[in-house]
Image (cartoon, rainbow, N blue to C red):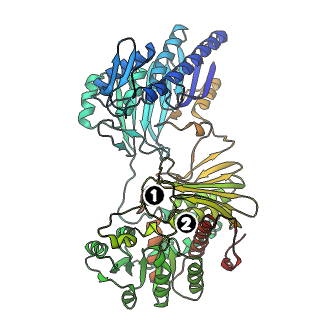
């Protein structure tokens, strides 16, 4: 037996298991396969600036250039599959007909926006060549795996009649299918937690973001590779046509959608309840004391009661809360308030029985309101929160806490003197994957926390249409310093709270840089920020956000000396991972003379930076992942649960522990980050804004 492994080739990992007693022959075969893969990589890898495809992409839009005979042959193959798939396979992802092949092996593009991408072709093409090498050496049994998504089984397992492969659901690791490979290629494709929406329909130009996967079984590796991606974007009519053109395939689509139930997601409450039945459950719940106010037992006590809720601010985020409130059985919307008529009317359309106000102070005079939800521009948070508490209302306010440090301290001090419940929308504190992930971190799973990296990237200007010039600052309030703290208060507020939660302390100093790099449209707040927060032990938060590139999306990474937790995805990686990969299990089986299925098929690739790391899921079952692109809110990110908890507090009067303190800490850090950038200096945490809750 011979095992060959290349950690990074053709954009992924490559493993091969060759079964034969002649080691010299196997070594020679491996050398030939390695050489061939490296050669093909130099032709087809568009991420290599020196590859042939990169040179074509860089120059062909300007003039025709000569290409290799092999590239010419490859493009002719691509043209064939372009036609036989009714243009659903297209290495240009736009229009293959814009490629012109000339005599003497020359090529040109008829449009400057055309480029070649062989991602859905290269591995199948390579497998076809590898199979030929194996056959030439008279090796009858071999198992070849490209990144778990392109697998060729030749002959059979030494102790079985085929090669058994299981295909797992990436969202919950349940079994989707099991395959018996014998002189057959299995190619799989699909979306995963890490990579949703990377498969594009070249005809419509739209990305497929559905939770589904595909598998293709074929004797032809190239055919399997091409069709596994195509099958992700076809409709039923197109499937019927393709099965006529490709008669010898077995194609399957797997729907991995979660079952969507009406009402607030109670999964977190079930998780909380289960803590009482596991070892250390009470201690675990003690680390998240804000959850003790919304347990299932306490919810049963108010089963027939409703909190009378009013909304102050009914723009996009206010309406987001309205939709969530409608799914909460113990909530009743009785009033809405906004001083912008279109927003108020939209809220009334959603809540026809609610009373309307244009002045929040008049609303606060009503005796028929238990609690208010504040979704206004940031500079109005403090005045409305303070007035609402003084009026005896329970209060739920959007993050960040307030526009200035002085206002934050005023709210905190007022809260110490009131009996009213006060919440700020720190939804990560109520998100199951964050709660469970944080418990894993504090249990030592990833070792000592040695650093934190958070980023939030979008590609949008934050502007909204303005019907009249005098409404510019009212509608686009996020762009002006009088009403907004920019990226720090709008985005970083959530992420800095997560870092402090992981570190169990506050940073002692802050430095940073901020600029208006791209959106030079009269705005005052930065569109690009980099801020570093330093803790007393030298641990740091590296925070970055910009809104002119969305490639990296949003993530909260907690770095430990034993592993890394990606909180937003609910995944962790270990530095020394003792779990056994599928190929290692297969090798062990052969050595132990065991024949069984191995969990090696997966729906998609992983980038080379993660090649040596295996992702582990923080929680079992479906995970809701926020890609950070929405300016309004994400589904099931904890916002509905914290809102439900607030409505519960409006009925019981019970305060949620630590929510105000956490909001205060994260907001103050955001505002100090802005100060450090504006003043271009290193800032120490000011004593006048320290509170007893803080640990340094």
Front residue of 641/197: it is: 197
**Element carrying mark 1:** loop
Q: Residue 493's mark?
A: 2
**Where 396 sits versus 486, above or below?**
below
Furthest toward the right, the residue is 537
Please identify the quadrant where the C terminus is shown.
bottom right
Side of 325 relative to 625 (left or right): left
**Residue 5: quarter of image:** top right
Give the x, y percent position of residue 443. Answer: 68, 58
**Element carrying mark 2:** helix
Give the x, y percent position of residue 345. Answer: 27, 75
At x 75%, y 64%, the residue is: 536
At x 55%, y 20%, the residue is: 37
Give the x, y percent position of residue 537. Answer: 76, 61
Please identify the quadrant where the N terminus is shown.
top right
Question: Is residue 277 among what the camera can see?
Answer: no
Front residue of 69/494: it is: 69
Side of 547 relative to 539 (left or right): left
Q: Which of marks 1 and 2 is nearer the N terminus?
A: 2
């Amino acid at each position: 037996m011979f095992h060959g492994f290349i950690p990074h080739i053709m954009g992924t990992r490559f493993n091969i298991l060759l079964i034969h007693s002649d080691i010299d022959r196997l070594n020679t075969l491996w050398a030939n396969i390695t050489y061939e893969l490296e050669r093909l990589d130099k032709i087809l890898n568009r991420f290599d600036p020196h590859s042939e495809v990169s040179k074509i992409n860089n120059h062909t839009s300007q003039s025709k250039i000569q290409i290799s005979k092999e590239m010419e042959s490859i493009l002719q193959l691509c043209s064939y599959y372009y036609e036989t798939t009714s243009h659903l396979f297209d290495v240009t992802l736009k229009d293959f007909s814009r490629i012109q092949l000339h005599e003497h092996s020359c090529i040109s593009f008829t449009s400057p926006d055309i480029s070649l991408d062989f991602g859905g072709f290269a591995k199948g093409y390579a497998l076809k060549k590898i199979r030929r090498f194996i056959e030439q050496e008279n090796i009858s049994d071999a198992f070849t795996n490209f990144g778990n998504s392109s697998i060729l089984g030749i002959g059979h397992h030494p102790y079985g009649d085929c090669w058994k492969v299981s295909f797992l659901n990436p969202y919950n690791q349940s079994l989707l299918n099991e395959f018996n490979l014998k002189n057959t290629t299995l190619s799989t494709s699909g979306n995963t937690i890490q990579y949703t929406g990377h498969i594009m329909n070249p005809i419509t130009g739209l990305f497929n973001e559905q939770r589904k996967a595909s598998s293709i079984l074929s004797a032809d590796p190239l055919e399997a590779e091409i069709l596994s991606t195509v099958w992700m974007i076809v409709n039923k009519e197109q499937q019927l046509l393709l099965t006529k053109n490709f008669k010898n395939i077995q194609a399957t689509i797997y729907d991995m959608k979660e079952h969507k139930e009406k009402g607030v997601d109670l999964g977190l409450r079930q998780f909380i309840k289960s803590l009482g039945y596991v070892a250390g459950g009470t201690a675990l719940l003690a680390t998240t004391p804000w959850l003790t106010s919304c347990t299932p037992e306490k919810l049963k006590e108010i089963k027939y009661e409703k909190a009378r809720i009013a909304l102050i601010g009914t723009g996009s985020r206010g309406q987001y809360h309205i939709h969530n409130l409608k799914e909460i059985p113990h909530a009743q919307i009785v009033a809405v308030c906004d001083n912008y008529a279109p927003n108020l009317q939209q809220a009334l359309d959603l809540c026809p029985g609610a009373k309307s106000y244009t002045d929040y102070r008049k609303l606060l005079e009503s005796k028929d309101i238990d609690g208010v939800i504040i979704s206004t521009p940031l500079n109005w948070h403090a005045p409305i929160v303070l007035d609402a508490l003084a009026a005896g209302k329970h209060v739920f306010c959007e993050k960040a806490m307030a526009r200035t440090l002085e206002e934050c301290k005023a709210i905190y001090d007022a809260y110490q003197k009131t009996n009213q419940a006060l919440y700020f929308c720190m939804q990560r504190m109520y998100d199951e994957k964050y709660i469970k992930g944080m418990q894993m971190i504090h249990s030592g799973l990833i070792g000592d926390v040695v650093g934190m990296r958070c980023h939030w990237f979008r590609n949008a200007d934050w502007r909204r249409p303005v019907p009249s010039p005098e409404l510019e600052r009212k509608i686009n309030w996020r762009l002006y310093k009088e009403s907004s703290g920019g990226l720090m208060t709008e985005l970083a507020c959530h992420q800095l709270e997560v870092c402090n939660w992981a570190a169990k302390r506050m940073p002692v100093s802050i430095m940073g840089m901020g600029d208006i790099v791209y959106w030079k449209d009269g705005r005052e707040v930065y569109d690009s920020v980099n801020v570093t927060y330093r803790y007393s032990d030298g641990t740091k938060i590296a925070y970055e956000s910009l809104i002119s590139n969305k490639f990296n999306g949003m993530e909260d990474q907690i770095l430990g000396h034993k592993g890394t937790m990606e909180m937003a995805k609910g995944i962790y990686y270990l530095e020394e991972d003792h779990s056994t990969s599928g190929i290692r299990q297969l090798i062990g089986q052969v050595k132990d003379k065991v024949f069984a299925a191995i969990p090696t098929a997966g729906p998609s690739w992983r980038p080379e930076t993660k090649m040596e790391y295996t992702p582990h899921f923080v929680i079992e079952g479906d995970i809701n992942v926020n890609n950070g692109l929405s300016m309004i809110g994400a589904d099931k990110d904890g916002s509905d649960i914290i809102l439900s908890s607030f409505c519960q507090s409006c009925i019981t009067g019970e305060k949620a522990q630590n929510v105000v303190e956490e909001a205060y800490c994260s907001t103050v850090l955001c505002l100090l980050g802005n100060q450090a950038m504006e003043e271009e200096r290193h800032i120490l945490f000011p004593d006048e804004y320290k509170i007893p809750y803080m640990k340094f």
